[in-house]
Amino acid sequence: MNLKPLGNHIILTVADKETTTALGIIIPDTADKERPERGTVVAVGPGKLLENGTRQVIDVKAGDEIVFKKYAPDEIELKSPTGESKKYLVVNADEVMAIIEK
């Protein structure tokens, strides 16, 4: 990945929500137009620069699964050198509500 978040931004990936009914019918995530509220942290910025010259501590790290506000993230799409594209979400650390512990 060629993305390095700045300030208090966090880059996430979201798993596809493909579900299967009892009869075996697969319903793709495109059938549900709701925005995601959960994601896996890929990269974390250094934290917001405060007035006293220090950085705000961000409580999440790469690999954490988090819950964030539904309409908070911005979606970006990057293409790899092979031409494959992948979607990422960028969210502000203040919009993260919880870490899902396993």
Image (spheres, rainbow, N blue to C red):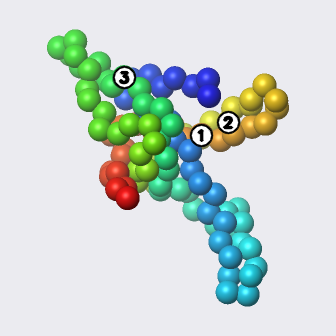
Which of disc 1 and disc 2 is earlier in sequence? 2
Q: Are there few (<14), some (14-19), or many (20+) residues within 10 Å of tag 2?
A: few
Q: CA distance from mark 3 to mark 2?
A: 22 Å
Instruction: Identify the residue position indicated by label 2 in the image.
Output: 77
Q: Secondary structure at mark 3?
A: loop
Q: Is residue 79 above or below residue 52?
A: below
Tag nearer the camera, 3 or 2: 3
Q: Residue at x 66, y 66 (%)?
A: 18
User: Do tag 2 and tag 1 residues touch (Cβ < 8 Å)?
Assistant: yes
Q: Any mark on residue 8, and which?
A: none
Which of disc 3 and disc 1 is earlier in sequence? 3
| Quadrant of the image occupied by residue 85 | top right
| Quadrant of the image occupied by residue 61 | top left
Q: Dividing the image into 4 quarters, which one contains the C terminus?
A: bottom left
Of all residues, the one furthest to the left in this rendering is: 52
Of all residues, the one furthest to the top in this rendering is: 53
Instruction: Identify the residue position indicated by label 3 in the image.
Output: 46
Q: Any mark on residue 88, and which?
A: 1
Residue 73 image offset from top left, x and y in percent = 50, 43
Which of disc 2 and disc 3 is earlier in sequence? 3
Query: As drawn, is 75 to the left or to the right of 95?
Result: right
Q: Amino acid at mark 1?
A: Tyr
Q: Amino acid at mark 2?
A: Glu
Residue 7 image offset from top left, x and y in percent = 39, 23
